[in-house]
Image: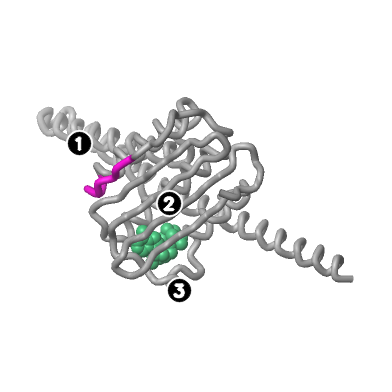
Amino acid sequence: MTKLHNQYEELKDRQLLNIRIIEAQEDERKRIAREIHDGPAQSMANVILKAELCEKLINKDVEKAKDELKNLKDIAHLSLKEVRKIIYDLRPSVLDDLGLIPAVSKYINDFTNDTGINVDFITLSEHKRLKPEIEITCFRVIQEALTNIRKHSKARNAVIRLEFGDRFISIIIKDNGIGFEKTSQDNKFGLLGMRERVQILNGKFEINSSPNEGTQIYISIPLGGDKCND
Ligand SMILES: Nc1ncnc2c1ncn2[C@@H]1O[C@H](COP(=O)(O)OP(=O)(O)OP(=O)(O)O)[C@@H](O)[C@H]1O
Ligand SMILES: [Mg+2]
C-alpha cells in the first residue's frame, strides 16, 4: 500500500515537472517571438520604408537619397546584429565547437561591455570537453546567474570560478551586490530552472544570499552521471 502510494506520488511529481518543462518551453518561445517582433522585424519594416523613400528621392535629390541609403545600411547592420544575438542566445555555436571555457569567456566579455560590471573568470584546471548536456547546463546556469546579477544585484564586481575535476565539474558564481531574502524568490522561474537543470543531471545546487551581503551560487555536476556527494 505504502509502496503503491509512493509510486503514485512519484508519478505525480514527474507529471508536474513535465508540465513545468512544457510551460517553460512555451514561455521561452513567447520571449523569442517577442524579441524577434520588437527587434529585427521592426528594423526590417524600417528598411522597407527607407528603401521606398530612396526610390522616390533618387531622381529628385541625389544627396538626400545618399543620406537615406546610409540610414538604411545602418538599420540593416543593426538588425543583423539583433538576429545574431538571438541565434547566439538560442544556442551559442562556440559552445558546441570549442566548449565551455571559450563560450563563457565570450559571454562574459559581451556582458561586461554591455553592463560595465567587471567579472573575474577563474579556471582552476585544464579545460576539457564534457557531455553536451553538461556543457549546456553549466552555460545556462552562468547565463541566468549573470542575468540576475545585471537585473537585481546592483553589483560592480562578480567572480566566476570553474573547476574541471576528474569526477565532476564545479562552478561558483559570486557577486558583491545587495543580495536578497529567501522569500523573494518564490514563484520565479530563473533560480528554479537552474536548480532543476542541475538536479536532472544528478548535480548539486546551492544558493546563499542575504540582504547587503551579495549572492553566491554553487553547482557541482558529476561527469559520469552518478550522484554528487562531494
Ligand atoms: N544576484 C542577485 N542579487 C540580488 N537579488 C537576486 C539575485 N539573484 C536573484 N535575486 C532575487 O531573487 C529573485 C528570483 O530570481 P529568479 O531568477 O528566479 O527570478 P527573476 O530574475 O526575478 O525572473 P526570471 O529569471 O524568471 O526572469 C529575483 O527576483 C531577485 O529578487
Ligand atoms: Mg532571473
Q: Nearer the viewer, mark 1 or mark 3?
A: 3
Residue 154, image quadrant: bottom left
Q: Secondary structure at mark 3?
A: helix
Please report the bounds of the magenta region as a residue range.
114-121
Which of these two is toward me, 148 or 159? 159
> In this image, 137 relative to 76: left or right?
right
- Give the residue pinned by disc 1: 71
Q: Quick one: label 1 or label 3, which is nearer the N terminus? A: 1
Question: Residue at label 2?
Answer: 144
State whether residue 52 appears in this view: no
Relative side of 41 to 6, left or right: left
Q: Position of residue 188 (x, y in %)?
A: 48, 65
Please name the amino acid that badge 1 sits on.
Asn
- As for residue 159 lying within the magenta part, the answer is no
* Ligand 1 closer than 8 Å to label 3 CB: no
Q: In this rendering, which labeled residue sits more in front, label 3 or label 2?
A: 3
Answer whether residue 115 is magenta in the image: yes
Q: CA distance from mark 1 to mark 2?
A: 35 Å
Depth check: give the residue in front, 172 or 29: 172
